[in-house]
Image: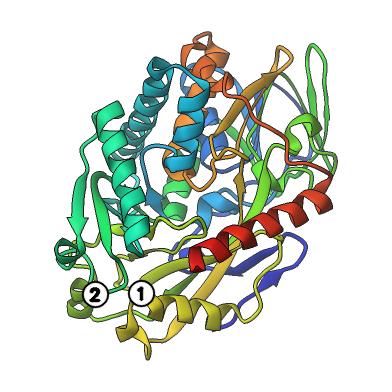
């Protein structure tokens, strides 16, 4: 097993997801001048979803992706399809908005899961989707916090969740690591790259002009903006910015005023060698996806071919951890000691984007530039929904867009170097608290 490090973009590219799919031939890069209604920047869930929705409403759409569809976080994440915005994101929305608006935001996340399932059926996307999700507490203190979150979620959002004490957990997961857990039968997991590629194909079939290997170098604003690449340009009525932390890697950031409101966080995964089906079923009988509720968390699930896919070791200084395989093996055996002798076949990772308050950041710059960013680890479900929200707003219905655009987001202090150092110190502080 070899890990390929793309130092320019800070990603480890030996991905199980890439190895287990057959990509279509790449779309040609943009090498001409185009005039369209909407130009979408970014070929992940949000950008492709927005382009797909707009094309279905009769808009002429061009989509520019710097690498390949699903190359970034949309094609290398944990595959966990989770409703809501995480405890921190939900708390931020509740603190800033009325209970009615917070409930509306929650309901939109549920709609995002329904939208995902509808698209899988409508476009015949086979991505190994199944329901079932566990949130796990590593000690009694974390268990109390988890139970408080569960009770608040049930009370405020009437969302069904099941409490699992240490004994009840045994029917879900073969480990003594956790003190308690919560089972969510609505959330689930899937193969994230297959899902994104399926959306990309649906967008192409709907008439979206997709250009891969077409990094945006500059955005010229105006009544009719112009989005420029190395070899072409797109003039349009509206622009949608959905490139997250990879924007600005190949030229000017198209919207520098929002750049400091997200921070790149490295997250890394491994895939074990295939387990026997009997052993896999013994390990996680219900085959639910799982994560703990630490700030710097472990997350894991079984693949369709019986591998354990395990993510951990987030890096807040935008560098790949040293001895990645050994560190990840230690994390795995901390949860599943019975896997000490199991081989690791793949290791990969890259950046996700987080906001300071962990709530998603949707907005508009001027009259004709829309953006979405900051999914903070909850993008598999909500990013697809966010694309639809932006498409709705462009088509004239901004009611849901207005719910999220009113959430305030602070800038991470200082320039890139300073805010990274500050975040690293903060994460070490919280990690030390959790260890103690």
For the point 41% across and 76% down, the residue is 332
Rendering coords of residue 110 (x, y %): 33, 31
Distance between mark 2 and mark 1 Cα atoms: 14 Å
Q: How dense is the environment of label 1, judged by Cα within 10 Å: few (below 14), some, or many (20 and up)?
A: some
Say which of marks 2 and 1 sits in front. Answer: 1
> In the image shown, does 101 or 77 lie closer to the viewer?
101
Give the residue number, with chain letter if any, for mark 2: 280
Q: Mark 2: which secondary structure?
A: helix
The image quarter containing residue 226 is: top right
Q: Is residue 88 left or right of residue 64?
A: left
Q: From where the camera sits, is residue 132 visible?
A: no
In percent of width and height, residue 281 lies at 19, 72
Check if mark 2's residue and mark 1's residue have beta carbons within 8 Å: no
Task: Establish if 232 lies above or below 393.
Answer: below
Q: Position of residue 163 (x, y in %)?
A: 20, 50
- Left or right of residue 113: residue 71: right
Determine the secondary structure under disc 1: helix
Residue beneath the point at 53% across and 68% down: 15
Q: Residue at x 47, y 65 (%)?
A: 311
Residue 184 shows in the view:
yes
Q: Is residue 378 left or right of residue 313?
A: left
* 45 is higher (above) or lower (below) than 405: below
Which badge, 2 or 1, comes first in the chain's sequence?
Answer: 2
* Residue drawn at point x = 73 percent, y = 43 percent: 247
Q: Which residue is mark 1?
A: 335
């Amino acid at each position: 097993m070899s890990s390929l490090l793309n130092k320019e973009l800070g990603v480890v590219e030996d991905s199980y997801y890439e190895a287990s799919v057959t990509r279509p031939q790449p779309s040609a890069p943009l090498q001409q001048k185009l005039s369209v209604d909407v130009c979408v920047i970014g070929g992940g869930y949000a950008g492709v979803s927005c382009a797909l929705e707009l094309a279905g409403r009769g808009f002429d759409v061009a989509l520019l992706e710097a690498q390949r569809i699903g190359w970034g976080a949309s094609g290398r994440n944990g595959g966990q399809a989770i409703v809501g915005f995480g405890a921190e994101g939900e708390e931020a929305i509740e603190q800033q908005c009325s209970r009615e608006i917070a409930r509306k935001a929650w309901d939109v996340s549920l709609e995002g899961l329904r939208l995902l399932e509808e698209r899988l059926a409508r476009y015949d996307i086979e991505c190994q989707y199944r329901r079932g999700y566990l949130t796990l507490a590593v000690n009694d203190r974390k268990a109390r916090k988890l139970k408080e979150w569960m009770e608040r979620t049930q009370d405020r959002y009437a969302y069904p969740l099941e409490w699992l004490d240490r004994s009840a957990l045994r029917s879900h997961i073969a480990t003594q690591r956790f003190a308690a857990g919560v089972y969510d039968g609505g959330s689930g997991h899937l193969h994230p790259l297959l899902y994104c590629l399926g959306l990309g194909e649906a967008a192409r079939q709907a008439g979206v002009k997709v250009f891969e290997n077409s990094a945006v170098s500059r955005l010229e604003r105006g009544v009719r903006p112009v989005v420029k690449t190395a070899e072409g340009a797109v003039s349009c009525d509206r622009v949608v910015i959905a490139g997250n932390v990879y924007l600005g890697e190949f030229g000017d950031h198209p919207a520098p005023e929002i750049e400091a409101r997200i921070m790149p966080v490295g997250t890394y995964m491994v895939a074990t060698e295939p387990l026997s089906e009997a052993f896999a079923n013994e390990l996680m009988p219900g085959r639910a996806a799982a994560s703990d509720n630490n700030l710097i968390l472990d997350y894991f699930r079984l693949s369709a071919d019986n591998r354990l896919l395990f993510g951990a070791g987030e890096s807040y200084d935008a560098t790949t951890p040293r001895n990645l395989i050994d560190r990840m093996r230690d994390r795995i055996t901390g949860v599943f000691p019975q896997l000490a002798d199991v081989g690791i076949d793949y290791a990969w990772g890259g950046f996700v984007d987080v906001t300071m308050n962990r709530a998603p950041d949707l907005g508009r710059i001027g009259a004709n530039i829309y953006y979405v960013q900051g999914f903070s680890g909850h993008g598999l479900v909500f990013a697809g929904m966010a694309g639809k929200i932006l498409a709705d707003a462009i088509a004239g219905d901004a009611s849901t867009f207005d719910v999220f655009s009113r959430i305030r987001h602070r800038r991470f202090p200082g320039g890139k170097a300073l805010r990274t150092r500050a975040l690293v110190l903060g994460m070490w502080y919280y990690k030390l608290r959790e260890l103690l």
